[in-house]
Image (spheres, helix red, strand yellow):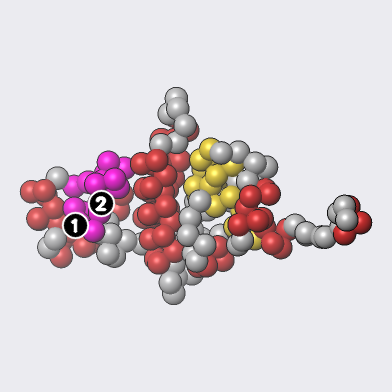
């Protein structure tokens, strides 16, 4: 689909490029005409939430078919995509969007999941990172959290002090 093909853009770092289906340079020059816009070619400065979700889904598929753990390059591309998705959600109604598989960390490994938890403080993250998939992204991606109804760890767990267990 044309919307899955990305236009070359100086904003795209070398670590992101291998994970995006790029239009070759001669076609990219032609694609910059109104004809390219009508085709819906993806440009990083104007990409839609759905286009970033497709990038995340493709990264998740690649990770699933890989024989090894998720690489730092895939993780970097996923974090970039989640940050850009958060920006693309500004003023956008997420109703009808496919729920993306997001990058999370669990038990010391990266995973892609539709049900990542948001750890708003380091103590919650440290206590639960072995048991739950913790979103591996900037903490300020509030539109992303809200659009896909990600659970906040602080709302799911309760921490209590037990002074009777402390030795004097």
Which image quadrant: the C terminus? Answer: bottom right
* Res 68 quadrant in image: top left
Determine which residue is flagged by label 1: 10
Dot 2 alpha-carbon crowd within 10 angstroms: few under 14, some 14 to 19, many 20 or more: few
> From the viewer's perspective, is 72 left or right of 7?
right
Residue in view at x 55 percent, y 44 percent: 105
**72 relative position to 9: left or right:** right
**Magenta residue check for 20:** yes
Crowd tier of the residue under label 1, counting other residues whose Cα lies within 10 Å: few below 14, some 14–19, many 20 or above: few
Residue at point 68% right, 49% down?
127
Picture residue at 53% right of the left edge, 47% below the top: 104
Q: Secondary structure at mark 2?
A: loop
Q: Quadrant of residue 120?
A: bottom right
Q: Is residue 13 visible?
A: yes
Residue 151 in view in this figure: no
Instruction: Give how far across and how far down residue 126 sits, in percent.
Output: 63, 50
**Residue at label 2?**
13
* Nearer to the camera, 48 or 159: 159
Distance from disc 1 to disc 2, alpha carbons, whole Å, reads 7 Å
- Asked if residue 26 is among those painted magenta in the image, a careful observer would answer no
Picture coordinates of residue 92, whole percent (x, y):
44, 70
Start-end of magenta stretch = 6-23
Residue occupying the point 13% across, 53% down: 28
> Quarter of the image holding residue 122?
bottom right
Q: Nearer the viewer, residue 38 or 78?
A: 78
In this rendering, position of residue 93 left or right of residue 6: right
Residue furthest to the right in view is: 164
């Amino acid at each position: 689909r044309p919307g899955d093909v990305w236009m070359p853009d100086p904003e795209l770092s070398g670590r992101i490029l291998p994970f995006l289906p790029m239009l070759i340079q001669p076609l990219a020059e032609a694609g910059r005409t109104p004809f390219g816009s009508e085709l819906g070619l993806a440009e990083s400065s104007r990409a839609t939430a759905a286009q970033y979700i497709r990038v995340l889904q493709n990264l998740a598929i690649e990770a699933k078919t890989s024989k090894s753990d998720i690489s730092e390059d895939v993780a970097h591309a996923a974090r970039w995509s989640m940050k850009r998705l958060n920006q693309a959600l500004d003023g956008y109604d997420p109703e009808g969007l496919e729920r993306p598989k997001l990058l999370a960390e669990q038990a010391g490994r990266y995973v892609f999941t539709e049900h990542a938890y948001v750890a708003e403080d380091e103590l919650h993250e440290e206590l639960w990172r072995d048991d739950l998939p913790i979103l591996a992204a900037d903490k300020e991606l509030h539109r992303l959290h809200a659009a896909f109804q990600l659970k906040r760890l602080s709302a799911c767990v309760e921490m209590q002090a037990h002074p009777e267990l402390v030795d004097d």
